[in-house]
Amino acid sequence: MSGPLLTRIDHVGIACRDLDEAAARYAELFGLTVVCRETNDEQGVHEAMLEVSLAPAGGSYVQLLQPTRPDSPVGRFLDRRGEGIHHIGYGVDDVEAALATLDGQGVRLIDRRPRHGSMGAAIAFLHPRDLGGVLTELVQARPGQARD
Ligand code: CO
């Protein structure tokens, strides 16, 4: 593999108790608009993606996360730590190849195989214990998506 494994900062994931209120705050204070909203039942989360920048570098977003239930990962995070930064998502060219490389380097993988992320991306999480306490997400954007 040539070049850095991580190609860009894709998004900052922020846990909040009220997605509408948080989205309104980012709109009012920063002029950001929601470009995608979805519910991920598997992860137990309502998500809103607010676009910060587009091409040529690749899209970057604020990802607001509101738990759908208290026992979901984001629900437990809110209980323990309150609202705030939950994870950082980095762009990668090939999420499966990146997982194999990092696995070979001894990084603990939360996801051994990619799963579905917002806006059709393939994503995988790395364990914060090997990354200075930062929950880290790898994001391979869907080809042809504006997000690319
Ligand atoms: Co994310």
Image: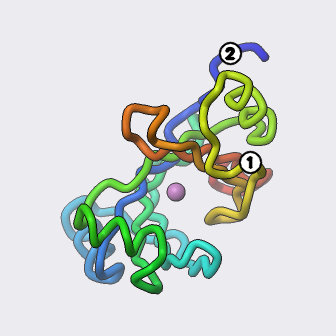
* Disc number placed over residue 60 in the picture, else none: none
Residue in the picture at 74% in, 41% down? 95
Residue 34, picture quadrant: bottom left
Ligand 1 has an atom within 8 Å of the beta carbon of the residue at disc 1: no
State the residue at coordinates (52%, 46%): 89
The image shows residue 7 at horizontal and vertical percentages of 60, 30
Residue at the image position 55 percent from the left and 72 percent from the top: 36
Horizontally, is 143 left or right of 124 in the view?
right
Task: Give, as a three-letter code, the residue at label 1.
Answer: Arg
Question: Which of the 4 image quadrants contains residue 77?
Answer: bottom left
First in sequence: mark 1 or mark 2? Answer: 2
The residue that label 1 is drawn on is 112
Look at label 2 and name its amino acid.
Gly
Q: From this viewpoint, which residue is outermost toward the top?
A: 2
The x, y position of residue 144, in whole percent, is: 78, 53
Query: Colour scheme in the image?
Result: rainbow
Which numbered disc covers residue 3? Answer: 2
Residue 73 placement, left or right of 114? left
Say left or right for 85 vs 60.
left
